[in-house]
Image (cartoon, helix red, strand yellow):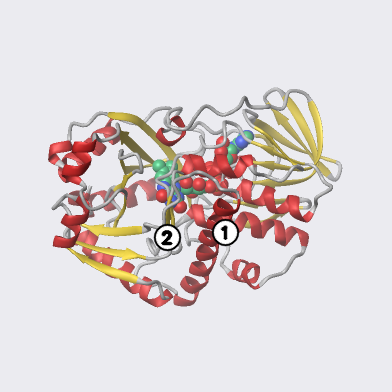
Amino acid sequence: MKFGTIRDLPVEHADCGWYNLLPAPPPARPVAGPEAADWAIVGAGVCGLAAARRLAEHYPDQRIVLLEATRVGLGASGRNSGFVLNYSPHGVGSGADHDFERRYAEVLSAGVDELRRLVAEHQIQCDWSEWGRLYVSAGSDGDHHLADVRAAHQRVGTEIRDYDATALRRLTGTSFYHSGLWAAGNAIVQPAAVVRGLAATLPVNVDLREETLVTAIHRRGDGFQLVCDAGEVTADRLILAGGCYTGGLGGFRGRTLAVATYGSMTRALSAEEKAAHFPETDELGLLPASHNGSTVRLTRDHRLLIRNSFDYSRPGRRPPAVPGEAIDNHRKALRARWPALGDLEFEHNWGGSIAYTRNQGALFGRLAEGAWGVVAGDAGPVARGSITGKLLADYIAGAESALLSTQLSLAKAAWLPPDPILGFAVNRELKSIRRAGAVEL
Ligand SMILES: Cc1cc2nc3c(=O)[nH]c(=O)nc-3n(C[C@H](O)[C@H](O)[C@H](O)COP(=O)(O)OP(=O)(O)OC[C@H]3O[C@@H](n4cnc5c(N)ncnc54)[C@H](O)[C@@H]3O)c2cc1C
């Protein structure tokens, strides 16, 4: 782990449709002076929240400070498309290592179960829905990936159902798609409501301090000093759960890269628009089979969410606003699917970054004496982080389980070359994805 000043600070786009649709939260309680704790956790996304909850159960008499730069729900965990995926074979391809795939799927399934349990136990109002996911294809690139997705789901034993063009048209109200595959055991949610609900129900010995940016981390004796924008925390032990900013915090350096993607959300459809275009369903969760396709949600309050477009998100140089080209792509995707709704106004546009590794590897474990880290990236990160955060706390506390053994058996994230080589390689890959799936946008 590398200590010192943090150069890659979170700069999420201020807007986030999911967050803005929730009531205003109670005022934040930033760190505003010197404080001491047994544990400091940096980052209150799915990983940090899960680690804090479990750590508090293992150490009920110890004080855990959970530090978050913005508000819970404004980070990636609250600004995603809301799919809680039990297995996401994207990126695995036909050359998959089947044993790795089975173990990866086991961890993700446990993540869905864990989140489902917490939502039910704490009655978190987050529009949790077992509607699941429907992979959809609109061209040859999508068909190619759909075949891989089908084979991978069959290997790990997911219940699946094929959709032909007619069934898709009936369900989705568009003839844009020509084949699809529904997979069981997944959920769709209002993501900002999920994380806010998780934060509101943390055990009493977790002290959540939002609007607290950690700007430097230093070793102090056996412990750590976390310098914040308006105070500081000294802690005996430390967990880094800063999502794609964790490398900047000093953990898993050179093991992750970040890719930005963007979403736009329309106003709510009128009752007439809803009845005319989506007579058969109250919600939708469509995932593109093509990597270049658009994720689409019809939300419970009948808004359409479109997510597409990718950019390499270089540490310290992330774009401060959603690029106009991404918003144009959202408009284009809406028009291509529902021409009669194509001019619906977007009420929200936002973006965020996802951490990727070279090998879908684990970002999990000990970073230095008294310091650990966990990041959810690659495929199905919301489910993944919901369980790996918990497992990290078990690992620290020495609580063994078969699932922890599975997590520990996954390969660690492989080394990546530095910029500009990394940026060059990622941009080249993104370009080929855009070209291959141009018609699927
Ligand atoms: C548009 C979009 C759509 C997506 N769709 C999906 C989807 O449908 N399903 C899915 O599974 N995944 C999806 N993802 C990815 C997923 O949201 C993330 O990979 C996952 O939430 C990451 O969780 P995390 O806990 O590792 O990190 P984060 O949620 O990023 O949490 C880390 C937190 O650390 C804080 N932090 C970082 N640095 C500091 C610092 N110096 N001081 C204080 N705090 C700091 C950040 O503010 C942040 O809140 C999507 C992502 C985006 C952007």
Residue at the disc numbered 1: 114
- Closer to the N terminus: mark 1 or mark 2? 1
| Residue drawn where x is 43% and y is 27% of the image | 320
Q: Quadrant of residue 362?
A: bottom right
Amino acid type at mark 2: Asn
**Image: 422 above or below 138:** above
**Image: 98 above or below 48:** below
Spatial separation of the CA atoms under disc 1 and disc 2:
12 Å
Q: Is residue 31 left or right of residue 274?
A: right
Instruction: Residue 346: give x, y in percent of width and height.
Output: 28, 30
| Residue drawn where x is 68% and y is 27% of the image | 29
Q: Nearer the viewer, residue 29 or 127?
A: 127
| Secondary-structure class at tag 2 | loop
| Residue drawn where x is 81% and y is 39% of the image | 37
Amino acid type at mark 1: Glu
Q: Is residue 218 left or right of residue 94?
A: right
Label 2: how many residues lie within 10 Å, few (<14), some (14-19) or many (20+)?
many
Q: Is residue 91 left or right of residue 167?
A: right
Q: Is residue 54 visible?
A: yes
Instruction: Residue 233: give x, y in percent of width and height.
Output: 77, 33
Total labels: the figure holds 2
Residue at the extreme right: 221
Q: Is residue 338 left or right of residue 357?
A: left
Instruction: Residue 415: give x, y in percent of width and height.
Output: 54, 57
| Residue drawn where x is 60% and y is 71% of the image | 406
Q: Quadrant of residue 142?
A: bottom left
Instruction: Residue 160: give x, y in percent of width and height.
Output: 33, 70
Label 1: how many residues lie within 10 Å, few (<14), some (14-19) or many (20+)?
some
Q: Nearer the viewer, residue 418 or 284?
A: 284
| Secondary-structure class at tag 1 | helix
Residue at the disc numbered 2: 186
